[in-house]
Every structure is written in C-alpha cells, then in structure tokens.
Image (tube, rainbow, N blue to C red):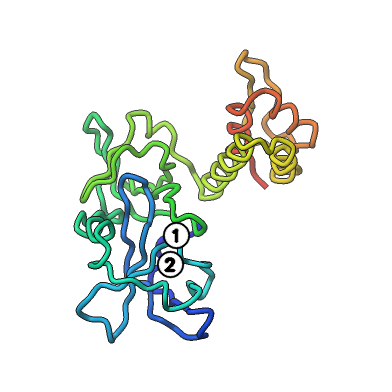
Amino acid sequence: MKKSTQVLGQPIISISDGAEIGKVKSFVINPDKGSVDFLTIEHEDWQVSVKAIPFKKVIGIGEYAVTVESDRAVIDLKEIPVADQLVNKKIRIIAAKVMTRKGELLGEVKEFYVDEDTGCIPGIVLLAGETEEILSSDFIMTYGKDIIIVKEEAPGHFLDSADKLLQKMEAEETEEISAEGGMDVLRTKQVELLKGKKASKDIYTGSGERIIASGMILSEEDIVRAQEAGPGVFVELSMNVEE
C-alpha cells in the first residue's frame, strides 16, 4: 500500500530496455471501481498527446521507481475510448470535500492510498478541522469531481493509523482466500499475521462473550478462538492489534 505522493513523480523504468520512459504525472481515477486505472506520463517529447500506462501493466512500485515490462505498455489515452471517458470525468481525490449522504461536511481529502498490486484505493486521509483521519473506502459511496460522498456512519469508523487500514486490507484478503476454498492456507496466514501482537481492545463474540482481553499478547490459541467465532469477530480483532 502506497500513499499517492509516493507514486507521483516516480521515474517509470522499462525492464527490457533498462531505460526511463518518463515520470508519473497524474492518476486517472475510475470512480465506479474506486481505483487508479492509468498512470499518465510526463515526458518532454510528449507534449501534445496524453500518454499513459494501464495500472494492470505495472510490474512494481518501489521506493525509487515504477517498473513496466517494456515501453509497449505505453498507450495514447485518446485512442482508448474508455480511458478517454475517465480522463474527461476529471475525478480528483486530493482536495475533494468529504460529505455524508445527508449533507454533513466532514473535511477535505489530504491524501489517499493505492494498492500497488491492484490499483484499488483502500482508503483516504481527510483533514477534519485540525485533525487527520483515515477512512476506509468501504464507507465511500461516490467519487465525484469535487466531492466524495460517504455513508452516514463513516465518522464513527475513522482509523487512527495507516497500519489499521493495512490490517483491514490483509483481513479482507484472507477472507477472499477463504471464499475461494483455501481455508487451511487462510487460517495459517491469519495466525502468522497476528501471533505475538497485542490486542488493543476487548474482543467479543456475537453473543457477548469476551474471548480476547485488551492488552493480551496473542497466542495461536487466541487467534484460532477468534477464527472460530466468525469472520466478523476476526476482522474486529485484526483491526485492533498493535506491535
């Protein structure tokens, strides 16, 4: 997971040529999917047309560069109708106002995160008065040109750190593995992720039984107990742990 500012301005390197294609100029946002679908390219020789790389063609986003297989990954956005339509929507996230569906203004977006593997936007950072809050994209209903609409309950689900958002992503990823039938792999991965971490709040089952106490250092048995209590309980645990 990367901040948008960790991607913008990065050199784009062609692996096959060992050469720089250009630099990341901007993101083309797909508001329906909540994802970055294209990275536009800044290059001194491409001033007229808008060149870009489909996010699915990105091999990796490292600390110093974005890599692609070759310069064949570069396209002209005007030649791809779907891409051109997205550009014309002019969806911006940074500096967009964040408002609930009932019209309550929560703040303004200061930053957002990008999943470097998929291009999905897992969450945003909004400035609410003098406080920065992180909101999972699960609560975002609409990405507009100037305004982002979120669910009414969003203010009650702000996260206090990027680590919490990353933990939520990992928990959702393991749930997807479960849905695909990889239960044994899923449970093993969950144990590896959480074993030895400290619970930061009490965790209860749906019937109100406390199965994890705040401050407890999680053992394999504790994690298995949360797994057996159901997906919702495990997600709650995974979002409330610290090193």
Mark 2 element type: loop
Q: Residue at position x 75%, y 41% from top?
A: 188
In percent of width and height, residue 115 lies at 48, 55
In percent of width and height, residue 174 lies at 62, 40
State whether residue 119 is above or below residue 215. below
Q: Quadrant of residue 56?
A: bottom left
Query: Which three-letter amino acid code belongs to the residue tagged 1?
Result: Lys
State whether residue 79 is above or below residue 130. below
Q: Residue at position x 34%, y 49% from top?
A: 127
Dot 1 and dot 2 residues touching (CB under 8 Å): yes
Q: Residue at position x 50%, y 59% from top?
A: 116
State whether residue 116 is above or below residue 122. below
In percent of width and height, residue 211 lies at 71, 23
**In this picture, residue 227 sits left or right of residue 96:** right
Q: Which disc is residue 3 wearing?
A: 1
Q: Which disc is residue 7 wearing?
A: 2
Extreme residue toward the top, this view: 207
Mark 1 crowd level (few <14, some 14–19, many ≥20, 10 Å Cα): some
Viewer-nearest residue: 196 or 136: 136
State whether residue 24 is above or below residue 121. below
Mark 2 crowd level (few <14, some 14–19, many ≥20, 10 Å Cα): many
In percent of width and height, residue 21 lies at 41, 81
Marks 1 and 2, how far apart at CA:
7 Å
Q: Residue at position x 66%, y 35% from top?
A: 181
Query: Which three-letter amino acid code belongs to the residue tagged 2?
Result: Val
Mark 1 element type: strand
Q: Quadrant of residue 213?
A: top right
Q: Which disc is residue 168 wearing?
A: none
